[in-house]
Amino acid sequence: MTSIFTKIINREIPSKIFFESDEVIVIQDINPKEKVHLLIIPKADTKDFFNTPAATLSMLNGTAKRVAEKLGLADHFKIVINNGFGQEIDHVHYHFLSNRDIGQIEFIN
Ligand code: AMP
């Protein structure tokens, strides 16, 4: 079944997108738990962290570092990955969180 994140990637449902490449999309979490709460989502749909190839995880890590640097949060963020436990959406994703107030986020190049 197509995940809600794949529908966002395919522009079938709207989302606030902050970064996009051929491999990944970074969006605003619709129900933010912190001042900054983004979701880093690979376009290739695997159901969870455990089942995601190492190369994809490496790409996601690099994206997280890029987002942190571009948002001025390199020293103040956390990544949360729910693998089965606490996971609502079966399409692997990283939660990128910070409680620092950085104001409005612009598109990240
Ligand atoms: P998880 O529990 O790790 O699967 O997290 C799923 C996350 O997706 C939650 O933080 C939700 O708030 C978020 N979410 C659900 N639907 C959407 C949506 N349409 N756009 C953005 N974020 C969403």
Image: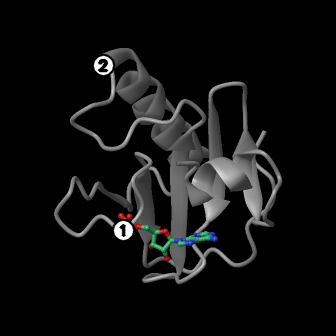
**Residue at the spot 47% in from the left edge and 25% down from the top edge:** 59
Across and down, in percent, residue 68 comes to 51, 49
Q: Which residue is mark 2?
A: 54
Q: Is residue 71 visible?
A: no
Across and down, in percent, residue 88 comes to 36, 68
Image quadrant occupied by the C terminus: top right
| Relative to 61, 8 lies left or right | right
**Residue at the spot 72% in from the left edge and 46% down from the top edge:** 9
Residue 87 in the image: above or below residue 92: below
Residue 53 in the image: above or below residue 3: above
Label placed on residue 88: 1
SS assignment at label 2? helix
Tell me which amino acid carries mark 1.
Glu
Location of residue 12 by image quarter = bottom right
Location of residue 46 by image quarter = top left
Across and down, in percent, residue 79 comes to 33, 55
Tell me which amino acid carries mark 2.
Ala
Tell which of 42 and 12 is nearer to you: 12
Colouring method of the image: one colour
Q: Residues within 10 Å of mark 1 (few under 14, many from 20)?
A: few
Location of residue 54 by image quarter = top left
Residue 10 in the image: above or below residue 4: above
**Residue at the spot 56% in from the left edge and 81% down from the top edge:** 101
SS assignment at label 1? loop
Across and down, in percent, residue 104 comes to 75, 75
Mark closer to the chain start, 1 or 2: 2
Mark 1 C-beta closer than 8 Å to ligand 1: yes
